[in-house]
Amino acid sequence: MSLPPSPYSAGAGRLLVERAPAKVNLSLHIIGRRADGYHLLESLVAFAGCGDRLSLDPGRPLGLTVSGPGAEAAGAGPDNLVLRAANHLMARRPGLVAGHFHLDKRLPVAAGLGGGSSDAAAALRLMARLNGLDRNDPAILAAAAATGADVPVCLDGRARVMAGIGERLSPPLALPPLFAVLVNPRVPLATADVFRRLGLPPGAMRDAAPQPATPAGGCDGSEALAVLARARNDLEPPAKALSPAVAEALILMRDLPECRLARMSGSGATVFGLFDDCRAATRARRLLAAARPTWWVRATVLR
Ligand SMILES: C[C@@](CO)(OP(=O)(O)O)[C@H](O)COP(=O)(O)OP(=O)(O)OC[C@H]1O[C@@H](n2ccc(N)nc2=O)[C@H](O)[C@@H]1O
Ligand SMILES: Nc1ncnc2c1ncn2[C@@H]1O[C@H](COP(=O)(O)OP(=O)(O)O)[C@@H](O)[C@H]1O
C-alpha cells in the first residue's frame, strides 16, 4: 500500500501557501430571481481570521490531497472546488503550469461560510503566483465566476458589497474590525435547497429592497453595528424551516448578555454574533462552547 504524499513534502519546486478565510455575509438581501433560476442579491461580505489553508507543490502533476476535520465532507475528487477552479483556469489558458494541491480543511462544509469558494479562490491565487499571472487577469476572473457565484468576492478576501448573483463587486470597503463569534451546529445545509425553499418563481422581482446597510468608511465599530442592525439575511426564514438548529443557534447567540447583533451567514447554518470588543467575544465563545460542546464555535475578527 502506498502512503499518501506528505502535505509538506518539498517536491521539485518551492511549496506555495495561501490562507482561505471564512466568508461572512453581514447582510444578504434577495432582490429577485433570474429566468435561469439563480437569485439576484445584494450582500455585504466580510472575511474572518479563521479559515482553511491551501498549499501548492509545483513539482508534481495536477492533484489534490485533503486533511483536517472537514476532509471527508469536502472530498479530494475532481468535484472539489480547488480542482474545479484549477481546471477552469487551465481550460482558458492552456499551457499553464499546475502542481499538487494540499488542502487543510478546517471550516465546516456546507455552512454558509463559503469555505469551498474561498478554497477555489486560493487555488486561483496560487496558480496566478506560480505562473506570474496578475490576479485581475481576465482568465482568473472568468475561472472564478465559472467555479461558483461566491468565488469572485473571495478572490482577494476584502470586504465588499456583492450584487447580481455575486459577479458585481463594489470596491473594497474599509470596515472597522468587527469582533465576532461564529457558531455552526454541525448540520450541513445545501445552498440550492435554501434558495429553493424561498419559493420565488424564476423571472420574479421582489418589491424594491433597501440597499444593503453599508457602514461608511472610517466609522467606528459601534456606528457599524448600528448600521448593520438595519439590514437582514433573507435566507434566514427558509434555512430555519429546513433546520431547527438554525433557530436554536440564533436564539442562543441573541440571548448572550453582551451580544449586539446575531444573524445567519449566507445560506446557513452558521450564525454570527457581533460584540463590542475582543474580550466580550471570547467570553461569548466560552459560554456557547460550554452550552453546546459538539458545535463548532470560533471567536474571530471580521474585516
Ligand atoms: C448563498 C451564498 C451567499 O454568499 O453563500 P453560501 O451560503 O453558499 O456560502 C452564495 O450566494 C452562494 O454562492 P455559491 O455557493 O458559490 O453558489 P453556487 O455554487 O454558484 O450555486 C449553488 C446553487 O445555489 C443556488 N444559487 C446560488 C447563488 C445565487 N445567487 N442564486 C442561487 O440560486 C443555485 O441553485 C445554485 O445551483
Ligand atoms: N474545498 C471544498 N470545501 C468545501 N466544500 C466543497 C469543497 N469542494 C467541493 N465542495 C462541495 O461544495 C459544497 C458547498 O461547500 P461549502 O463551500 O463548504 O458551502 P458553504 O458556501 O455553504 O459554506 C459542499 O456540498 C461540498 O460537497
Image: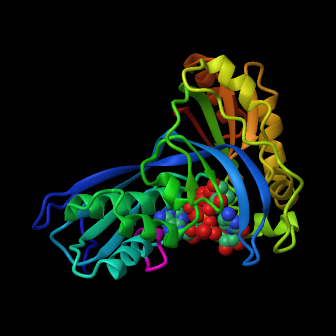
Residue range corresponding to the magenta coloring: 77-82
User: Does any portion of residue 267 appear in the rendered image?
Assistant: no
Q: Main secondary structure of the magenta part?
A: loop
**Could you say where residue 148 lies in the image, as x and y percent from the top left?**
55, 68
Q: Quadrant of the N terminus?
A: bottom left
Quadrant containing ligand 2: bottom right
Q: Is residue 209 left or right of residue 91?
A: right
Q: Nearer the viewer, residue 217 or 293?
A: 217
- Scheme by which the image is coloured: rainbow
For image coordinates 33% across by 58% down, the residue present is 125
Does residue 43 belong to the magenta stretch? no
Q: Is residue 256 left or right of residue 161?
A: right
For image coordinates 44% across by 80% down, the residue present is 78
Extreme-left residue of the structure: 12
Q: Nearer the viewer, residue 43 or 123?
A: 43
**Could you say where residue 92 lies in the image, as x and y percent from the top left?**
35, 79
Q: Nearer the viewer, residue 292 or 70?
A: 70
User: Does any portion of residue 242 appear in the rendered image?
Assistant: yes
For image coordinates 70% across by 51% down, the residue present is 42
Q: How many marks?
A: 0
**Could you say where residue 52 lies in the image, as x and y percent from the top left?**
43, 52
For image coordinates 63% across by 30% down, the residue present is 285
Q: Is residue 33 left or right of residue 138?
A: right
Image vertical order of residue 298 relative to residue 113, above or below = above
**Could you say where residue 36 lies in the image, as x and y percent from the top left?**
72, 78
